Image: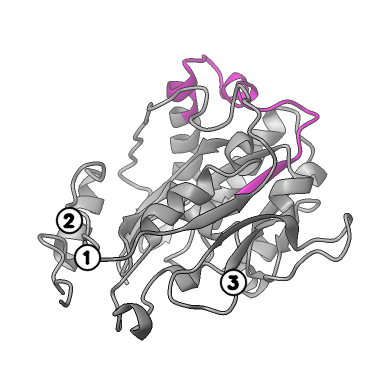
């Protein structure tokens, strides 16, 4: 039986209408995967979970702050001063502090090595705004974190390059793409051969997804900067998909696949649910992710 092609009331017009109004949470009816998918069998190879004060679900569980600026985009260009004002206002409201510096110190201290995970997938205008990345780096500096201890990372170096992060970040900040290669040594940048999620979605040959060494070895804390966007395999996405699919290798295999041996032929069959949540539960990703700031400047439909 073929799954439905429609997505209830979710279409491009409604998506952009809700994005523009800022009414994102709870506004969509998610696309429903077919109920006849086989049960997912999986194995996680990772360190034992060690509870930390700031890791997911964070210091303020379930708390969401929405900020708006009428001049955030002027003549189709993002306004850096408006982004700065929104970040400062949002951080102070989230933490209940009186100054921007105190707000950032709630999460970070000078000894931290902080990894920033933007969404670089797409073209300019559909990725995490560089203006937001710069303001986050400025906030970390207010908390005493040195630029040399800040890393902007993703799986694909070419996407970071095309999205101009190499040119936008201040001098001293490192930009790293792990390129889906396993780290050959403890000092190498890549993906950690000792931390992986193993499963078979559509009879693929490579059944493991490995965690980035930026997460497992370099960073002490992580800031997640997703975009408000739609994905054809999962519907609207945000924080969890950005951090999980940008930190693990070999994740495209989880959606839009086919497996004739199991009666699955053609898209939109998807195992994004539950794999996104499972990847986010793996240590040390769960413990190191302490702050999510969603770029809602534009709603991205693709």
Q: Secondary structure at mark 1?
A: loop
Q: Which is more N-terminal, label 1 or label 2?
A: 2
Q: Quadrant of the C terminus?
A: bottom left
| Mark 3 Cα-neighbour bin, 10 Å: few <14, some 14–19, many ≥20 | some
Separation of marks 2 and 3 at Cα, in angstroms: 28 Å
Q: Is residue 169 left or right of residue 248?
A: right
Q: Residue at x 58, y 42 (%)?
A: 223
Taking depth in this image into account, of 189 and 152 the one nearest to the observer is 189
Separation of marks 2 and 1 at Cα, in angstroms: 27 Å
Question: Is 260 above or below relative to 145?
Answer: below
Magenta run includes residue 144: no
Q: Residue at x 61, y 65 (%)?
A: 208
Q: Secondary structure at mark 3?
A: helix
In this rendering, the label closer to the viewer, 3 or 1: 1
Q: Which is more N-terminal, label 1 or label 3?
A: 1
Q: Which residue is mark 1?
A: 34
Taking depth in this image into account, of 264 and 150 the one nearest to the observer is 264
Q: Which is more N-terminal, label 3 or label 2?
A: 2
Q: Is residue 52 left or right of residue 69?
A: right
In this rendering, the label closer to the viewer, 2 or 3: 3
| Mark 1 Cα-neighbour bin, 10 Å: few <14, some 14–19, many ≥20 | few
Q: Position of residue 274 (x, y in %)?
A: 39, 53
Separation of marks 3 and 1 at Cα, in angstroms: 32 Å
Q: What range is drawn magenta here?
A: 91-116
């Amino acid at each position: 039986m073929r799954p439905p092609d429609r997505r209830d009331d979710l279409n491009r017009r409604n998506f952009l209408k809700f994005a523009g109004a800022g009414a994102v949470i709870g506004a969509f009816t998610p696309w429903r995967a077919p109920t006849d998918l086989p049960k997912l069998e999986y194995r996680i190879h990772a360190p034992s979970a060690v509870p930390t004060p700031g890791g997911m679900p964070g210091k303020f569980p379930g708390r969401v702050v929405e900020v708006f600026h009428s001049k955030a985009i002027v003549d189709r260009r993002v306004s850096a001063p408006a982004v700065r004002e929104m970040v400062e206002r949002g951080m102070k409201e989230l933490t209940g502090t009186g100054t921007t510096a105190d707000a950032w110190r709630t999460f970070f201290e000078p000894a931290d090595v902080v990894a920033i995970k933007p969404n670089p997938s797409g073209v300019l205008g559909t990725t995490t705004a560089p203006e937001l990345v710069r303001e986050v780096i400025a906030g970390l500096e207010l908390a005493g974190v040195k630029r040399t201890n800040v890393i902007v990372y993703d799986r694909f170096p070419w996407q970071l390059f095309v999205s101009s992060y190499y040119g936008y970040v201040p001098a001293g900040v490192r930009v790293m793409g792990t390129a889906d290669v396993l780290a050959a040594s403890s000092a190498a940048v890549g993906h950690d051969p000792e931390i992986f999620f193993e499963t078979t979605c559509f009879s693929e040959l490579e059944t493991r997804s490995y965690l980035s060494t930026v997460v497992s070895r370099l960073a002490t804390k992580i800031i997640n900067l997703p975009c408000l966007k739609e994905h054809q395999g999962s519907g609207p996405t945000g924080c969890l998909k950005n951090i999980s699919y940008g930190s693990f290798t070999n994740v495209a295999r989880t959606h839009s696949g086919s497996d004739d041996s199991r009666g699955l032929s053609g898209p939109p069959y998807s195992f994004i649910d539950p794999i996104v949540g499972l990847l986010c539960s793996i240590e040390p990703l769960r413990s190191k992710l302490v702050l999510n700031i969603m770029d809602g400047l534009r709603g991205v439909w693709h």
